Amino acid sequence: METVDRKYKNGNFISSLRYHTVEEWENYRDIPDWKRETLVTCAPYTATHQEAMLQLIANVEHVIKSNIPGDFVETGVFMGGSCMIIAEVLKHFGVNDRAIWMYDTYEGVPQPNDIETDPEGKLLNKWWKENAQLEGQASSWCNASLSTVKEHMKKVNYSGDVHFVKGLVEDTIPHQGPDTIALLRIDVDLEYPTRHVLDHFYPRLSVGGHIIFDDYGMFPSVQHTVDHYFYHNKSKIYLDRVDSTVVHGIKV
Ligand SMILES: C[S@@+](CC[C@H](N)C(=O)[O-])C[C@H]1O[C@@H](n2cnc3c(N)ncnc32)[C@H](O)[C@@H]1O
């Protein structure tokens, strides 16, 4: 396995719990070689669990095999590993006419509001001020620079369009983005940007398209935001569970 410079993990209390070793793939005996290679290539660059990575591969595969229209979007990319997975699957199926949109501050998770908590009920804002705050809006919580993430994406060498959209999603969305989305991965950790992305991009998700809420089981305020959105919006969705934090849905 390639060694990755983990300096952007400093102060990251969440991701430090979630990284995994390549040996874990040995328990998944039925995985075909191309998927195994995708996992091994991309795992060092994502904070997600192996179940979430496998689910993402399956989601992209479904989009392509079922001709679900639209581009691939991730809000909150950190080191870019989930988008690397998307690119690898598109390459496997010979697809290069789907754009990948990668939204992030590329300066880490910004300051949480005054009421958001971690799973144990501790205030994120307090933790952020004491442990993650850097100059200005930058923070050490999942901070990977734009140039670092571009280098990671180069490793998978996807020949289709890749859009790196830098800034708060509250500022960049909906002005920059695709009209039609086939897969939307929301992984911004905080309540307000999650709601903002849902408000603007869920209507653009194709019927049959996939949506992934990476933080649903991790952050109570994100769970509340997602539940609230679908309760009031009355948009039909099928939701299922991927792992202890990740929830996946299909627009119906
Ligand atoms: C948990 S990490 C994402 C992990 C990534 N999806 C993966 O597969 O490893 C959360 C990311 O969300 C970004 N983020 C948080 N709030 C944001 C906001 N309001 N606008 C843009 N990016 C944001 C952070 O900079 C960070 O990179």
Image (spheres, rainbow, N blue to C red):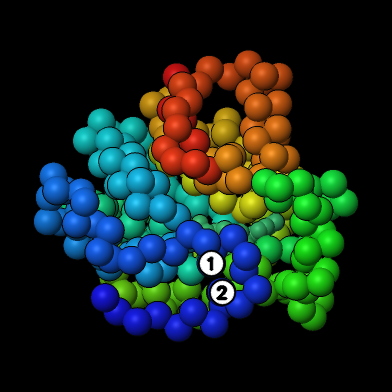
- The residue at 25%/53% (across/down) is 89
Residue 91 visible: no
- The residue at 64%/52% (across/down) is 189
Q: Which quadrant of the structure image shows residue 96? A: bottom left
Tag 2 residue: 9
- For the C terminus, the image quarter is top left
Q: Amino acid at mark 1?
A: Ser
Q: Which quadrant of the structure image shows residue 13? A: bottom right
Residue 124, compared with residue 9, is above or below; it is above
Badge 1 crowding class, 10 Å Cα cut-off, few under 14, some 14 to 19, many 20 or more, is few
Label ID, residue 75 = none
Cβ atoms under marks 1 and 2 closer than 8 Å: yes
Q: Secondary structure at mark 1?
A: helix
Residue 85, compared with residue 146, is above or below; it is above
- The residue at 48%/69% (across/down) is 79
Of labels 1 and 2, the one closer to you: 1
Splitting the image into four quadrants, where does ligand 1 fall? bottom right
Q: Position of residue 86 (x, y in %)?
A: 34, 54
Q: Amino acid at mark 2?
A: Lys
Residue 147, compared with residue 224, is above or below; it is below
Residue 71, compared with residue 3, is above or below; it is above
Tag 1 residue: 16
Q: Nearer the viewer, residue 80 or 97?
A: 80
Q: Position of residue 19 (x, y in %)?
A: 44, 64
Pick whichever of labels 1 and 2 is earlier in the sequence: 2
